[in-house]
Amino acid sequence: MAGRFEPRPAVTPTTVRGGEVVVPAPRAAARPQGGRERRYVPPGPLDLGLVLGPLRRGPGDPTFRTTPDGSLWRATRTPDGPGTLRIGARDGAVHAEAWGPGAEWLLEQLPAMLGEDDDPDAFEPRHRLVAATHRRRPGLRLIRSGLVMESLIPSVLEQKVTTDEAYRAWRLLVRKFGDPAPGPAPGPLERGRMYVMPEPRTWALIPSWEWHRAGVDNKRASTILRAVRVARRLEEAAAMDPRAAMARLELIPGIGPWTSAETVQRSNGAPDAVTVGDLHLPGIVGHALAGDRDADDAAMLELLEPYAGQRHRAARLILLSGLTPARRKPKMPRHDIATL
C-alpha cells in the first residue's frame, strides 16, 4: 500500500499519499468526438482525483492519463474487450465518453467505479486527525472497478521492491505487449501513447528475458503466470464479498494478504480490506494515532479496530492527512536485475 503513496514533486500530476491524482484545472481544449457518452450525477460530493487515483501506477502509467482540460483518461481491458474512458466533472455532474469494444461496459460500470455503492456516511471518525481529514476530503469515495486482473498484476509487480522498480516494470511490459488504446486517447505529444494492458494469453507468452529486462524476478513473474492461467476464475471475484474474493485470490501461490487486499480495494470497493504486511503502513498508522512509529501489523490492526468494517477508509484518510514519521532508515535498496 505504501509504495503507491510515495510523494512526488507537485509540478507533476501524479499519485500521492492516499491514492490521489492531481487533476489540472479545466481549460479550453478540443473535445474528442465519436465515442459513446454518459452523464452521471453522483449522490454526493465526488473528487475524481481521489476516487480514481488508486488505479494509477506512477506518472508514466500508459493506462492512465490526465490532460490540461481537466479530464482523466483510463485505458483498460473489459470483459467485452479493450476500452478507453474519458471522464470530466462540471456543474455537479460527471461527463464520460468511451471508445472501443469495451465502451458500453465501461459506461455501464461508471457509477459503481465512481463509488455509488460506497457508503461514506457509515464511517464515524474516532480520532481528531481522522476527523479533520474526513472533513477536508468530502469527495472521497471508494472505487469499485469491477476488474480484478488490472489491479492484481501491478500489485504483484509491487511485491518486495521499490515503487520506482514496480512502476517501471508495469510501464515497460504494458507498452511492449499491450494494445494501443482505442479512440482518440492522448498521443505522443502528451507523454507517450496510451495502451491497454495485455490479455491473459499474452502475459503467459512473455519470454523470460523480457521479464528480466523489465526488472521482474522469477518469483513475481511466476506468480503472474499462475494467475493469468485462471484469469476468468479470478475475475469472478469482482462480484464476490471482499473476504471471499481475497480468499480466492490467495489460492494462487505467491498471492498473500498484502496483494489480495491491494487488489480488492480497487476491484471490489472493499472498505475494510486493510493492507497488512506493508513495509511502511503500520508505522504511519501507529505514528498518526498513537505516536508509535515502530508499530507492527498487530499494533496497527489494534489501533484500527474501532473502525472495523471501515479500516481501509480510515487508513486512506490517515495517509491523506500527510502526518507521517520522518525517515530514519535507509530506503529499500534497489536491485535492477535487468543489469545482471
Image (cartoon, grey):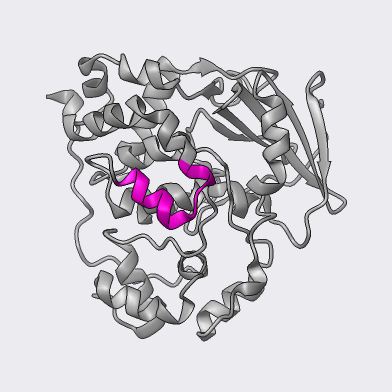
The magenta segment is: 237-250
Q: Is residue 317 above or below residue 223?
A: below
Which residue: 50% across, 28% down? 62
Horizontal side, residue 38 vs residue 65: left or right: right
Is residue 166 within the magenta segment? no
Classified by dominant secondary structure, the portion drawn in magenta counts as helix
> Where, quadrant-wise, is the C terminus in this rendering?
top left
Among the 4 quarters of the image, the one containing residue 276: bottom left
Which residue: 66% across, 48% down? 112
| Residue that extends furthest to the left in the rendered view of this protein | 340
Horizontal side, residue 215 vs residue 271: left or right: left
Which residue: 46% across, 55% down? 242
Q: Position of residue 153 (x, y in %)?
A: 37, 35
Q: Is residue 254 above or below residue 338?
A: below
Of residues 77 and 194, which is closer to you in this image?
A: 77
Q: Is residue 249 above or below residue 170?
A: below
Which residue: 37% across, 23% down? 173
* Numbered disc total: 0
> Where, quadrant-wise, is the N terminus in this rendering?
bottom left
Q: Position of residue 75 (x, y in %)?
A: 58, 28
Q: Can residue 126 be seen at all in this image of the molecule?
A: yes
